[in-house]
Image: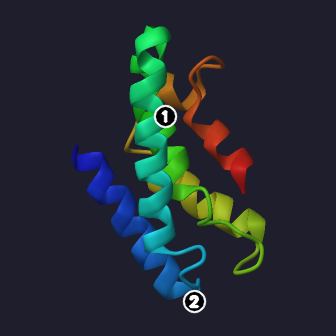
Amino acid sequence: MKLLSTLFNFVRLTAKTYKIDESHGISHSMDVFLKSNEIYNHEVIKSPFLINQKRIIYTAAILHDTCDRKYMDKEEGISLIKEFLKDKFSTRDRYNNNNNIYNVLFIC
């Protein structure tokens, strides 16, 4: 999935720019992604509607610490993520209340 490499690259660059340590850096993002993938694969069997939310689940897992207020102003982090995500998802994925990629930002 091309999106994954793009997301991890964003985490790597953000961690470098804002001096985010490894407790919230790329290794942590990879660990959380792997765990989310494990949970997704288990749950999608019982809840097939998750197939349509796979990209959002993975995006949230990977980006969840890139706007942590310990490293940057939270609003600045949210703006960076919004700007980064704006061309990665369809308009429907960005704004549909049931499948909203911007809900990822509530993890900050």
Q: Is residue 90 visible?
A: no
Left or right: residue 10 versus residue 82 is left
Q: Is residue 1 above or below residue 76?
A: above
User: SS at mark 1?
Assistant: helix
Which one is in front in this view, the residue at disc 1 or the one at disc 2? 1
Give 11 or 102, whichever is nearer the viewer.
11
**Amino acid bearing label 1:** Ile
**Disc number for residue 39:** 1
Quadrant location of the N terminus in the rendered image? top left
Q: Is residue 17 above or below residue 101?
A: below
Q: Is residue 90 above or below residue 88?
A: above
Q: Position of residue 86 (x, y in %)?
A: 46, 45
Number of numbered discs: 2
**Amino acid bearing label 2:** Lys
Give 1 or 30, whichever is nearer the viewer.
30
Q: Position of residue 15 (x, y in %)?
A: 51, 80
**Disc number for residue 101:** none
Please report the residue visible at 53 percent of the width from the left and 49 percent of the height from the top: 61
Q: Which residue is mark 2?
A: 19
Left or right: residue 74 versus residue 35 is right
Q: Position of residue 98 (x, y in %)?
A: 62, 17
Q: Mark 1, residues whose alpha carbon is within 10 Å: few (<14), some, or many (≥20)?
A: few
Quadrant location of the C terminus in the rendered image? bottom right
Q: Quadrant of residue 44?
A: top left
Specify how the rendered protein is coloured: rainbow
Q: Are marks 1 and 2 in contact (CB under 8 Å)?
A: no
Tell me which numbered mark, 1 or 2, is placed earlier along the sequence: 2
Q: Is residue 92 visible?
A: yes
